Amino acid sequence: MNYKTEFIKFMCDSNVLTFGDFTAKSGRKTPYFVNTGNYKTGAQIAKLGEFYAACIKENGIDGDVLFGPAYKGIPLAVAAAIALNNIHGINVNYCFNRKEEKDHGEGGSIVGHKFSDGEKVIIIEDVITAGTAIREVVPILNNAANVDISALIISVDRMEKGQSDKSALQEVYEQFGIKTFPIVTVLDIIEAIKSGEIEGQEYLDKMIAYRERYGVEV
């Protein structure tokens, strides 16, 4: 079993990936839902970090710093940094931002590694719907130093149209030149259902129909 299939099973076992009849924030009726807020144990976050590290390693992504946007990205960046070190022998810096800038002591909004010009930054996120969080994060990083945002790592790419005929990830690339690397895509999930790796056969037709209606080409 490759790490992508293992990750899909891990999401199902963690009640993060579920199938049914849901209404997304966009108002669309969707047959599947990804709720990363359901990760809640030490074992889960440790394992999750391993999947992010595997994605970084497999794609040969070079970075000096892992940045986790507050709040959900914070434990993800920490867990990924630990996994990169413990499993792959890659020691990287990590940091994250405060929602409100500290006005005492050393001040500033960045906790952890302090950026230097020219450093390659990998943003670690959970999922992206409209790309709003990334549009908020980029100015924070650029204000900290003249850094190179080399990649964005997310858990699932829904490969879904946003407000236009392009996905949020495509829009982020066009606007900022940041390439996104998902651990898995919705196509991987559909294939896992087809092959019987996970349950959800009764939702397969709805998954395919949803993809045909709202999906984007890569």
Image (tube, rainbow, N blue to C red):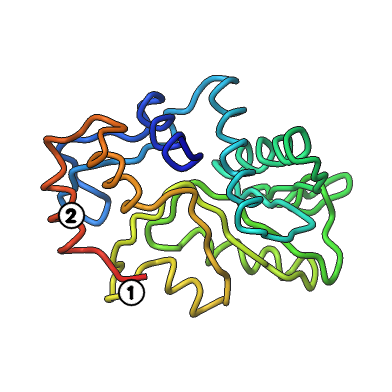
Q: What's the distance in space between the residues labelled 2 and 1, CA to CA?
A: 16 Å
Q: Badge 1: few (under 14), some or many (20 or more) residues near its Cα, within 10 Å?
A: some
Residue type at mark 1?
Lys
Using the image, determine if residue 135 lies above or below residue 20.
Answer: below
Q: Is residue 66 left or right of residue 26?
A: right
Please name the residue that numbered disc 1 is placed on: 166
Q: Position of residue 156 (x, y in %)?
A: 42, 49
Q: Badge 2: few (under 14), some or many (20 or more) residues near its Cα, within 10 Å?
A: few
Q: Position of residue 214 (x, y in %)?
A: 21, 63
Q: Residue at x 60, y 20 (%)?
A: 42
Q: Which quadrant of the structure image shows residue 63?
A: bottom right
Using the image, determine if residue 10 lies above or below residue 99.
Answer: above
Element type where label 2 sits in the image: loop
Using the image, determine if residue 30 lies above or below residue 143.
Answer: above
Q: Is residue 36 left or right of residue 143?
A: left
Q: Is residue 139 left or right of residue 165?
A: right
Element type where label 1 sits in the image: loop
Q: Residue at x 54, y 20 (%)?
A: 41
Q: Position of residue 52 (x, y in %)?
A: 59, 44
Q: Residue at x 12, y 47 (%)?
A: 206
Q: Which quadrant of the structure image shows residue 17?
A: top left
Q: Residue at x 58, y 59 (%)?
A: 152
Q: Position of residue 184 (x, y in %)?
A: 43, 49
Please name the residue that numbered disc 2 is placed on: 28
Q: Nearer the viewer, residue 40 or 26?
A: 40
Residue type at mark 2?
Arg
